[in-house]
Amino acid sequence: MTKEDILKAYLEDDLFIEKSYLKEGEAQKYKWASHTENNLIQIIKTAIEGELSNESGNITERKINTFLNK
């Protein structure tokens, strides 16, 4: 599974539509390189990158905290 496939699997969850993070069908069109102002999607991408590169949880956590504190 590629990082784009993993991201799409998360984005296809019904909660993203219910909570108005995405519109219906938008997850299928989403690409890894797509720019988004949605912080939740950016954090999910950071976590996926960390997991796929075997980064330690502490480093990924630090990256997420840095992103959130911008």
Image (cartoon, rainbow, N blue to C red):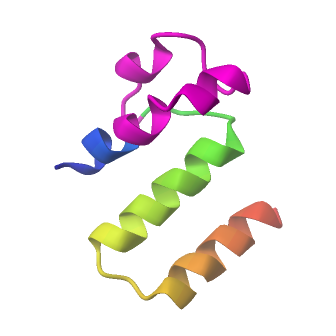
Horizontal and vertical percent for residue 53? 29, 74
Answer with left or right where residue 22 lies relative to residue 70: left
**How many numbered dots are placed on residues in this image?**
0
From the viewer's perspective, is residue 24 above or below residue 69?
A: above
**Furthest residue in direction right, as rendered:** 69
Q: Is residue 30 magenta?
A: yes
Residue at left 60%, top 13%? 23
Q: Nearer the viewer, residue 27 or 19?
A: 19
Answer with left or right where residue 49 lies relative to residue 46: left
From the viewer's perspective, is residue 14 above or below residue 24?
A: below
Q: Is residue 6 magenta?
A: no
Q: Nearer the viewer, residue 28 or 67?
A: 28
Q: Nearer the viewer, residue 46 or 22?
A: 22
Q: Quadrant of the C terminus?
A: bottom right
From the viewer's perspective, is residue 25 above or below residue 65?
A: above
**Furthest residue in direction top, as rendered:** 24
Horizontal and vertical percent for residue 1? 16, 49
Residue at left 61%, top 74%? 63
Can residue 4 be seen from the camera position used here? yes
Horizontal and vertical percent for residue 62? 64, 81
Residue at left 47%, top 53%? 45
- Magenta residues? 8-33
Horizontal and vertical percent for residue 26? 48, 15
Residue at left 56%, top 89%? 58
Based on the displayed image, in which of its 4 quarters is residue 32 positioned?
top left
Answer with left or right where residue 50 lies relative to residue 13: left
Answer with left or right where residue 31 lies relative to residue 18: left
Can residue 32 be seen from the camera position used here? no
